[in-house]
Structure formats: structure tokens, C-alpha cells
Amino acid sequence: MSNPVISIIAPIYNEEGNIALLYERITAVMEQTGETWEFIMVNDGSSDNSPALMEELAARASHVKTIHFARNFGHQIAVTAGIDHAAGDAVILIDADLQDPPELIHELIERWRAGYQVVYAVRRERKGETFFKRFSAKAFYRIINRMTEIDIPLDTGDFRLMDRQVVDVLKKMPEHNRFIRGMTSWIGFKQTGVYYERDPRHWGETKYPISKMLRFGLDAITSFSYFPLQIMIYVSLGLGFLAIILIPVVAVLRITQGPDFFGGQATTIVLLLLMSSFQLFFLFLMGQYVARIYDEVRRRPMYIVASTTGFNENNKTSDVRSDSAESILEPEA
């Protein structure tokens, strides 16, 4: 059997209430396109009935394929596993919560047919989300855009279509702390966006609480920006300049106002606490970069696959993603 034209990837983590409707809506869309397609669901260590529902769909439909992780490795790693196993000429990423409407796939494919190699979906409105969630999301994208060295489209998620040429380059990028939307922007090629209104989550709770969002943002910044390290020199220069100014000011005040003008230790303690807080904060930032270097040099597998369903030998990859820099960067013969 020849490879499908379209591969659709959905990471699954405790989405038992969404899987059936997600498949139904995707099927309705793809039947209208007339293209051959495959639907890859990646079970990211779900603890509910999601794995059983995935296997039930795979048993009924030959174009449904499943990947089951040995444990939870995270959303971005689940997306990566789907990309590694996808065989289509174009690959579409979509979340399973149905906030990103599958019906938009039509327009993504049309833009791809028009010659674009990355077609990303831009959120015009985010329904069913709190003010804090909307505000923090908008702030996140704008801060990332100012701090990173690449132009990441504002208000975009992982919902996008990527041409096979882009996918092949993405598969050669081995970093463990992944930020897929930033990586596709870094790759380049001809890109465009389509606008849509994001729906409320159909079932279940968000898999990105504040703690995960902060970690995700930190991954994005450290993957594409040296700004947190560079700002340290500016802060140190500013504090040094302030100290140089304050030395003669304090000397004059002590002479004119008397030696007791700055009496006591309160001022000294406050300044020491302030300086210590700056030092600890910058040590934390440096530690984050060092930790990510440590992740890469250990060369542990990015993920471990416990089982798969529906893949043949032509498009089944290794059950672990563990690439060395030498093997990844070596050109094919």
C-alpha cells in the first residue's frame, strides 16, 4: 500500500471523552477532501480508558494507527513521536480536546496545495477561557517574540500543517526540551497563517496548568534566546553605576548631616538582601541553561514506545527516539 497523502497526529492524555467525536469530525472532513490519509494517535501515558478506545478505533479502521508510550513523556514529545512515525506528504498536528476545529483542515490543505510548506492556525478568539488564561496566553506569545531570535507568529499553537520537506528537517533536530511551533519557525520555508475562533474544550480539563505553562515558556525562551543570560551584564553594569554615584552622595550626606544620618544596619541589610536576590535569580537562569545542556549530553531516549498498532515495516520507526548529533547531521548517501 502506498503512503497516504495526509497524516494527522493527535497526542492523547486522558481524553476518553473526546476521542470518538474527534475521530468522527476528522473523518467527515477527510472524506470530503478525497485524499488518502492516516490518523495517528499517541497515547502519552493515559490513566483513563483512552488506550482502549484508541485500539477499538484502530481495529475498526485501517487508517487509524496508535502509539503507546511506556509512560508520560509530555505533549511536545508525543507530537514528536507522531511526526517520527508519519508517512504522509503533509503532516497535520491537532490537539484532542476539540478546541481546534478539525473543519479547518480543509483550509490548511488548500493553502498547502497553493504552495505553502507550513500553514499555521492563528487564534482570533479563545472561547470558554478565563480572562487570566486569555491574558497570559497573549502576554506569553508577545514576550517570547520579543526575547527570541526568530519570528514566531503571534497567537498560534501547534495546530498546523507541515510539508514533508519541513517534517524531514524537523526529524533531524534532536533537542529534548522541544518547542515545536518555534522549531518550525526556525526551519523557515514558505509559511502562512489561517485565522479561526478557538472553541471551548469539549470534555475534560486542560492539561496545561500554570506550572506546566511556566515550564513550557521557559523551554521556549531557553531554546531560542540568550537574552536571559545577556541581561545579566546590563543589570550588573546598572548596579555598578548606581554604586559609583551613591558613594560620593553618601559621603557628602554624612559630612553635612552628621555621622548618624545613615545610622544602624537596616540600610546595609536591605542592600545585601537586594543584591542576594539578584544573584540567586541569575544563578537560577544559568542553571536552567546548564540543565538543558545536561539533558542533551546524557543522550537518553526522547521517548520509549511500549506498543504500536497499524504501522507497517515501511513507515515504522524505532521504539525509542535517541539520536546522536553525529548521526543526525550526517547527510544521506
Image: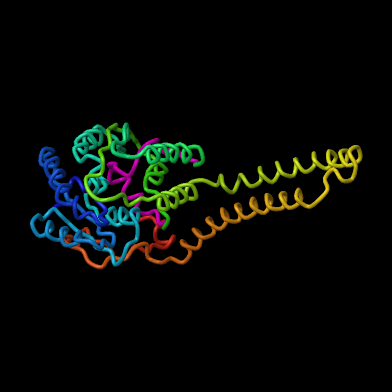
Q: Give the range drawn in magenta.
A: 149-175
Whether residue 164 is situated above or below residue 308 in the rendered picture: above
Whether residue 152 is situated above or below residue 18 in the rendered picture: above
Whether residue 225 is situated above or below residue 321 in the rendered picture: above
Task: Give coordinates of residue 178: x percent, y percent.
Answer: 40, 53
Residue drawn at the location 44% of the way across and 60% of the way down: 325
Colouring of the image: rainbow
Numbered marks: total: 0
Q: Image quadrant of residue 26?
A: top left
Q: Image quadrant of residue 80?
A: bottom left
Q: Residue furthest left?
A: 60
Residue drawn at the location 17% of the way across and 58% of the way down: 54
153 drawn magenta: yes
Q: In which quarter of the image is the N terminus?
A: bottom left
Task: Give coordinates of residue 289: x percent, y percent.
Answer: 53, 55
Task: Give coordinates of residue 186: x percent, y percent.
Answer: 42, 43
Q: Quadrant of the C terminus?
A: bottom left
Residue drawn at the location 25% of the way across and 55% of the way down: 12
Task: Give coordinates of residue 175: x percent, y percent.
Answer: 42, 56
143 drawn magenta: no
